Amino acid sequence: MASLLKLSQNLAKLPKNNIAIQHLRCATTAAKPNETLLNVPPTKVTTLNNGIRVATEDWGSQTATVGIWIDAGSRYENAKNNGVAHFMEHMAFKGTGKRSQSQLEIEIEDMGAQLNAYTSREQTVYYSKCLSKDVPKAMEILSDIVQNAKLGSQEIERERGVILREMQEVESNLQEVVFDHLHAIAYQGTPLANTILGPTANIKTINNTDLRSYLDNHYKASRIVVAGAGGVSHEELTKLAECTLNKVNNEYTAEIPSLSPCRYSGAEIRVRDDSLPLAHIAIAVEGTGWTNPDTLTLMVASTLMGAWDRSQASAKQNATNLARASGEGDLCHSFQSFNTCYKDTGLWGVYFVSDPLKIESMMFHVQEEFMRLCTSVTEGEVNRAKALLIANTLLQLDTSTAVCEDIGRQMLCYGRRLPPHELVHRIQSITAENVRDVCYKYIYDRCPAVAAVGPVEQLPDYNRVRSAMYWMRV
């Protein structure tokens, strides 16, 4: 205390025009908003000579996630080989030319790392979570399994049984079943109608030749992104990718695969099964692709629809109209809105689980809310939805794995990473008028796709559902 008092007395004796005082005053002056630098690590991107893109976000942590994102999924399959992309994902961990399956597992365990993969309709992903010091080893293993999968006949037969059991598990998950039916009816006759796992007949017949052909035709340099987040040096990961993935090229021995447009069709499919206790129903309209300027507005609209289930607090206290109506009227066990995006199209709608006798009332309230979004949603509601969407978006980016996934997906979809502050700014600029206009464009008087499984006798006829997609006004 005495030293602080002495310092203040000495400062008081200095002349008013003293340079030190002026510098101190300047330093304590608040910076203007447009002069303030964003305190976020940049996403660095480098394109290698063979066309592979390397993208990283380094915040100097002790852990990291690195992965290989490939622009290949069930959308690039046909009726004969549907399921081969997912089958290939399984085979990647069953040994390579350098490592047996047991050696691969031991190397990962010795590092204390995790190795994982997944297949979607448009992407196949292999990634590893590890300590930052083990990134070189993890990257070498990932490169090995992507390029040098052994694809032995015994391993193929073993995985065939694993995938068939996985299909049985998926078939017991009625939400997955409904969404597969929804894609099949909304994009009938196109690759997006394919399921990710493929039909049972295909799984039983896929062989080494099918897997090798798919690998050679789709795992190409221009369709690959190497992504890293956490304690990852961009320069180091670039050198590692250049060293371990230098054999990947863009030479095609067969026909070059292309992304054909997937036509949307408004239609319905009902799988009636009165032995089930509850009805599972999804209703959707055609949405937008990732790069469409209306995508974020539809995300705000989806947030306005909301989600609710009986395990939550009283529906009376919920901010969304549909939740209040559903809870107070005991119309459903749960519902959730969704906005599923692909490169050039998407599905926007609501999925709900309801008692058989409440289906008609629940469908009425869902479509009533659709129309309200198109005509009379308020600025206050939109502001609340924007705040919730921003919070959910940023909260999902709190781990290196989530950020790595965000980088890989956006590099394939947009060709660049949208930094969080840009995404927030775009969401904040959306107004209630924007929401009404965009919803009117994509929802009002549009033919919906409807998929229903369970005791669905009380689901209104499709013509009635279609007629509720607009309001007659005098």
Image (cartoon, rainbow, N blue to C red):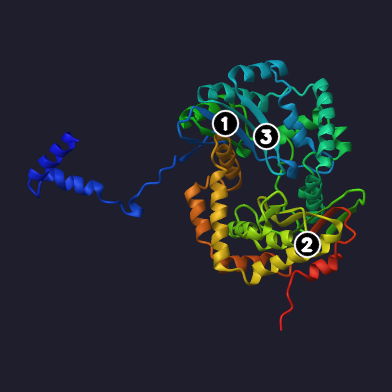
Q: Does label 2 or label 3 sit earlier along the sequence? A: 3
Question: Residue 305 in the image: x percent, y percent?
Answer: 66, 59
| 3 and 1 marks in contact (CB < 8 Å) | no
Q: Is residue 439 above or below residue 204?
A: below
For the point 72% across and 68% down, which residue is it? 368
Q: Residues within 10 Å of mark 2 (few under 14, many from 20)?
A: many
In the foreground, 298 or 361: 361
Q: Is residue 421 above or below residue 228?
A: below
Q: Which residue is mark 1?
A: 66
For the point 84% across and 41% down, which residue is it? 171
Q: Which residue is mark 3?
A: 219
Hey, what amino acid is under mark 3?
Answer: Tyr
Residue 227 in view (yes/no)? no
Q: Which residue is mark 2?
A: 362
Indicate the quadrant containing the N terminus: top left, top right, bottom left or bottom right.
top left
Q: Nearer the viewer, mark 2 or mark 3?
A: 2
- Residue 287: name its quadrant: bottom right
Q: Residues within 10 Å of mark 1 (few under 14, many from 20)?
A: many
Hey, what amino acid is under mark 2?
Answer: Met
Hey, what amino acid is under mark 1?
Answer: Val
